Amino acid sequence: MTSLSIFSTRVSLREAIVSKLKPSSTVGFVPTMGALHEGHLALIERAHKENDIVVVSVFVNPSQFNNQLDLENYPRMLEADCEKLENLGFLILLFAPAVEDVYPENELYKPIELSGLDTVMEGKYRPGHFQGVIHVVRNLFQIVTPNNAYFGQKDFQQLTIIKHINNVLKFNINIVGCATLRDSDGLAMSSRNLRLTSQQKQDALILFHTLNYVKNHKGSFKPKDLRVEALKFFHQGNLRLEYLEIVNGEDLSPMQDEWKEQSVCCIAAFCGEVRLIDNMRL
Ligand code: PAF
């Protein structure tokens, strides 16, 4: 018996969820854009441990790409994704919809005020990106109605914003942030790594090394001065830095003179054509 059930319409997915729901059962949801790697599979395994029903979505969301080329080049490999999901060996409801099924034609949608969480870092360099993310996440939450939803901490700003809209829109979903999985050399797992050559994978390690440097030198500098030291890592090498920020992990404001308990260093850099992000709690 196959452990994977695939749905392409919201109606068929809803029917399947409802038919499996018992009064006390919980639904765990892992939204993805596919090209699944170990990091996604860890989220899905956690959802399985903590819930009775597991729903995974694979949907490359056009509205969150501010660069057409990035959207076109985003890896799509549904067949291989299905095989990975099957191999997990437990029942998964996979939602792989078309654009019309996520964004109905007659839908009413007003952009959501994000209290400045979307104007820094990723938001500054990818205008509109987070409105696209929260639009799709909101719609997926409405379709799946999960109790628990699982997101990787690699997208730290995204996770912060999703927690925020969960409160503002009163979804009452438990948003679970899961630790970033890394290759043995420290490179954060990402679907975009598929587009890196082996030399670029080596070059990209500068992100991890810089984050470690910042973490290990927290005691010796003020945040604003440590940031200046860390920027020097990108003066050489093949990466093109977009931003490196040390922020308050609660409201994403840049940290200046004083360390807060919730401090996070976030970096985005281009490695060739591929844009990589990573972060570390300090
Ligand atoms: O993190 C991602 O893969 C995407 O931003 C998400 C949350 C699936 C929305 O498209």
Image: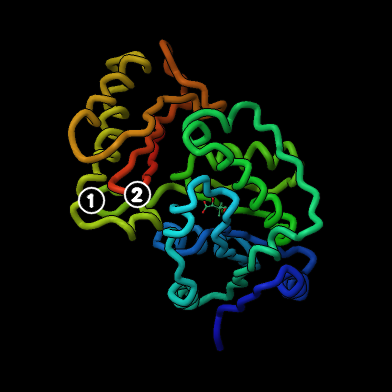
Residue at x-position 72% and y-position 68%: 10
* Closest to the observer, 244 or 21: 244
* 121 left or right, relative to 59: left
Q: At x 38% / y 30%, what residue is drawn?
A: 243
Question: Which of the 4 image quadrants contains residue 281?
Answer: top left
Q: In which quarter of the image is the N terminus?
A: bottom right
Amino acid beneath label 2: Val
Q: Which residue is drawn at 73% across and 46% down?
A: 172
Secondary structure beneath dot 2 equals: strand
Placement of 269 over or under 140, stated as above or below: above
Quarter of the image with the C terminus in it:
top left
Residue receiving disc 2:
274
Residue for badge 1: 200
Residue in the foreground of this view, choosing between 67 and 181: 67
Where in the figure is residue 256, as x and y percent of width and height?
Answer: 42, 14
> Which of the two discs, 1 and 2, labels the residue nearer the N terminus?
1
Across and down, in percent, residue 211 comes to 31, 34
Residue 278 as seen in the image, left or right of residue 134: left
Amino acid type of the residue tagged 1 in the rendering:
Gln
The image shows residue 244 at horizontal and vertical percentages of 37, 29
Instruction: Say whether marks 1 and 2 touch (CB < 8 Å).
Output: yes
Model colouring: rainbow
Answer above or below: position of 219 versus 130.
Answer: above
Q: Which residue is drawn at 42% across and 17% down?
A: 259
